[in-house]
Each structure stands twice: as structure tokens, then as C-alpha cells.
Image (cartoon, rainbow, N blue to C red):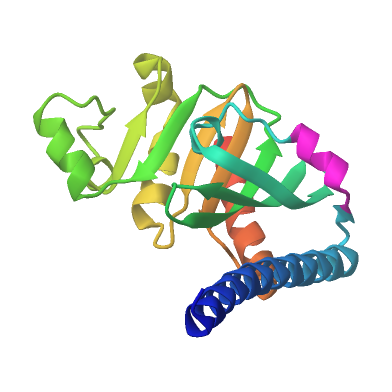
Amino acid sequence: MNIFLLISIVSSIFIVVFGIWFVVSNIKKYNKEQKREKENFANENGFESNEDFKEEISLDFKLLKYASKRSLNNVIKKDNILICDYRYSTGKNDIFYTVLQYKLEKDVPDFILIKNNIFYKFLKIFGYKNIEFEHYPKFSNKYLLRGYDDMRIKSFFSDDKLMFFEQLEDFDNIEVKNNLFMTYKYKIEYDMYNDFIEKIKRIIDLLGR
């Protein structure tokens, strides 16, 4: 075999192996850093950090139910609040979310509330179902509200709730199922956690009225 060809093959193999090692080692380093940062946040803010808490995260939510190659990590808990890092694969990319779950004390109908966009507006032309409120067109235009019991959901979304969501600027998708509340957004840095939690607490308090 030509010596130069042999050197080329060996070099190519080395580059591939080194590349794999580099990616894996950096992923491990990132995961360790994320775990340390979340543990620091938990200690400073009265949360408990325990990977066993991931068993308490419901997988019935739309975000978690249909994703492939999913993982829940860095779970922390305080009272009825659970927060974790969620990662799933689209086949080409890994998507990272911060997920917050809360056990509601009030009996609330199951629903999904997400921000409306051009895609959903297009689907509505072809009959995609959406619960709308005639006297709150801003809400109905801004959000997509869906659930199994339209009448109960409409009754639940009282005037104060509709006005609150109409005025809310920084909205995160919401799901309620079996009185479990879940919200999620693209990965939040830990120094922004307290602001995120306070905003969600206001929404939870509103849903509990």
C-alpha cells in the first residue's frame, strides 16, 4: 500500500476519533456545569436538588409526550413547584427547554394555551378548532386555546383571566392536565430563574381564583 495513502487513512481515522472525543467531553463538561449551577441556585433559594424528582414530572403533557430521545435533568423542587432542564431531539438538532410543573390546588379543566402564529391562523381556515371569546377579540387573536370541554373552559376563563392574558407581554406556553400546570420556554439561564418563577406564580394565582 502506498505510504501516503496509509498516512491519509490513519490521519482521517484519528481526526474522526478526536472529533467524537472532543464533542463527548464537551457535552459532559457542559452537563456538569449545568448541574453545579442549578445546585447553587437551589441552595440559595430554598429548593431541593435531587434527580429522583424527575419521577414526579408528568409525561402526559404535549411537549413531553410525543418527543423522541428526550431527557429530563437537573430537577429541583420547592413546595409544589418542580423545575427541570428538558432536552429532546428532532433528528437533526437537540432542543433545550426549561420546564416548570406545579400541582394546582383548585380543580381546573384541561387546556392548552399557546401563542398564536401564522401557522395556526392558516390552519383555522381549514377548520382547526380554537376556543374563542367574542367580547375579547384581542385574546382570541393573540392565543390559541384548546381543550376537550369547550363549555367548561369558556366558563373557567373569566373576564379577569382574559384581560390578564391580553395584557401579558412575555408569554410562555401553558398546559393543564389532571390539575397539573406546566409551562416551558427555551432554556433559561439560572440568573433569570427568579423572575421566571415570579411571573409564573402570578399566572398560577390567577388560575386558582
- Give the camera-side residue of 82 and 156: 82
In this picture, residue 55 sits left or right of residue 20: right
Give the residue displayed 58% in from the left and 58% down from the top: 199
| Occupied quadrant, residue 179 | top right
Locate residue 165, reporting x and y percent: 40, 49
- Predominant secondary structure, magenta span: helix
In this picture, residue 192 sits left or right of residue 9: right
Give the residue displayed 66% in from the left and 41% down from the top: 101
Locate residue 21, reporting x and y percent: 68, 70
Give the residue displayed 84% in from the left and 47% down from the top: 51
| In the depicted structure, whether residue 97 falls above or below residue 152 | below
Direction front: furthest residue: 1
Residue range corresponding to the magenta coloring: 49-56
In this picture, residue 149 sits left or right of residue 70: left
- Of the 4 image quadrants, the one containing the C terminus is top right
In this picture, residue 46 sits left or right of residue 68: right
- Give the camera-side residue of 35 and 203: 35
